[in-house]
Image (tube, rainbow, N blue to C red):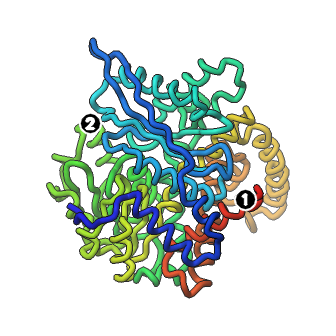
Amino acid sequence: MAPTKEPSFRDSVDLMFNRAVALMDLPPGLEEKIRVCNATYTVRFGVRLRGQIQTFVGYRSVHSEHMEPVKGGIRYSLGVNQNEVEALAALMTYKCALVEAPFGGSKGGLCIDPREYDEYELEMITRRFAYELAKRDLINPSQNVPAPDMGTGEREMAWIADQYARMNTTDINARACVTGKPLGAGGIKGRVEATGRGVQYALREFFRYPEDVAKAGLSGGLDGKRIVVQGLGNVGYHAAKFLSEEDGARITGIIERDGALIDDDGLDVEAVHQWIVKHGGITGFPDALHMAEGSVALEHDCDVLIPAAMEGVINLGNAARIKAPLIIEAANGPVTAGADEVLRDKGTVIIPDMYANAGGVTVSYFEWVKNLSHIRFGRLQRRQEEARHQLVVNELERLDRYLGDAWTMSPDFKARYLRGADELELVRSGLDDTMREAYQSMREVWHSRDDVEDLRVAAYLVSIDRVASSYRAKGL
């Protein structure tokens, strides 16, 4: 349990903002305009369930409208409150600015444990929540565009999109009112994996720079690195799966609600995932050491720690015992401001949340663009690209026949070269490019300024500067 002097999540965001703006030369009025949350709407609505009316409390917070629409997920959790939603909305503002997605920051939440309701009941609740927000333009393709978050997914986004369309029958862009939808409801390939894939791309980019890797006391690439993942939900699962299957990393620890699994030789991520789907937890999973107290596994010896669940899991109560030299924040706010200071003093490198988990909003941006353009990515150019490649292959085949055994094409070259990029490949390419560009913008500040000690401050400096530039352009 964290000590009582631990700053709240909202306080942590403000403290980290303060660290950054202290290094900037912003007019006090503009600094305050960027800091404050523009508006928060609280809704209380009733739904008749199980023979009686149940009342639910929900929030939608808009932090900054320097660009519109504003963007941010809707989470379903009993822990949802106004301070949390406003802090998350602020992070969304900085996150969107960092990855140059043309959105302001927003966030929503509903105080509910979705596991207590069946699918029909959840649909009734979600549709009523969507109605309450949409009638106040807090769901709108051009003003406020939600997405999935903790406790929500494609299913809930499809319900919200349909509810908005029912209320706005002549809006041709109705599908763009929300992102993270299923493919059959206007979604985009690669959205479900996007945040986890972004974590993978962020780590790849970090490990491309030996001097950055050396700052964490590590060397080499991702191959063979020992990784502990806290939370095997959508984000943690995809990050762990891709890092182990594609980059050769070893997932040596997985932490869940009912404990942790430890295997220094590496866990089979897919097998653990399937076990959780079938049994509701990791308890009883064979061929691995099970620790009943999962939080202790955060302190397990590893190279990379990926907190991918809740905020505040690394705090003043355990920061000094964290052994991982590199932490990448796949969740929002998993390291408190107090713990951040302890870890910095130890020399731990932290890849901050506003960058590390920006894969979700990046691909949400692609989905929003797809919905507004009313055409899937690759549809216009894919076959033309293949036809141009065919010309090159024809010439190579002619050369192949002319030279005989002296030269020949690689066996699979023709098939790989001829295939034009589909939507999933284009989405992954765009995400990879975004994560690289964003890291390089942080890295440049990190290495060029003596007063910038870590990547988090660098990320805030880049983001706040971009938001400030946007406000100045508006005449503020």
Q: Of label 2 and label 1, which has the lower sequence position?
A: 2
Give the answer, above or below, for where 465 lies relative to 153: below
In the image as oriented, which residue stretches furthest toward the top?
51
Residue 317 appears in the rendering: yes
Q: Residue at x 27, y 67 (%)?
A: 5
Name the residue nearer the viewer: 284 or 449: 449
Quadrant (top left/top right/bottom left/bottom right) for the N terminus: bottom left
Mark 1 residue crowding within 10 angstroms, few (<14) / some (14–19) / many (20+): few
In the image as oriented, which residue stretches furthest toward the bottom?
450
Quadrant (top left/top right/bottom left/bottom right) for the C terminus: bottom right
Name the residue nearer the viewer: 378 or 228: 228
Give the residue at mark 2: 278
Element type where label 1 sits in the image: loop
The answer to whether 268 appears left or right of 285 in the picture is right
Nearer to us: label 2 or label 1: 1
The amino acid type found where label 1 is placed reads: Leu
Q: Position of residue 42 (x, y in %)?
A: 45, 36
The amino acid type found where label 2 is placed reads: Lys
Give the residue at mark 1: 476
Name the residue nearer the viewer: 347 or 134: 134
Label tally:
2
Residue 184 appears in the rendering: no
Q: Residue at x 46, y 84 (%)?
A: 214
Q: Residue at x 38, y 25 (%)?
A: 122
Q: Residue at x 61, y 76 (%)?
A: 24
Q: Position of residue 186 (x, y in %)?
A: 61, 31
Give the spatial CA distance, label 2 vs label 1: 55 Å
Q: Position of residue 195 (x, y in %)?
A: 50, 51
> Which picture quadrant has residue 280?
top left
Name the residue nearer the viewer: 249 or 101: 101
Element type where label 2 sits in the image: helix
Mark 2 residue crowding within 10 angstroms, few (<14) / some (14–19) / many (20+): few
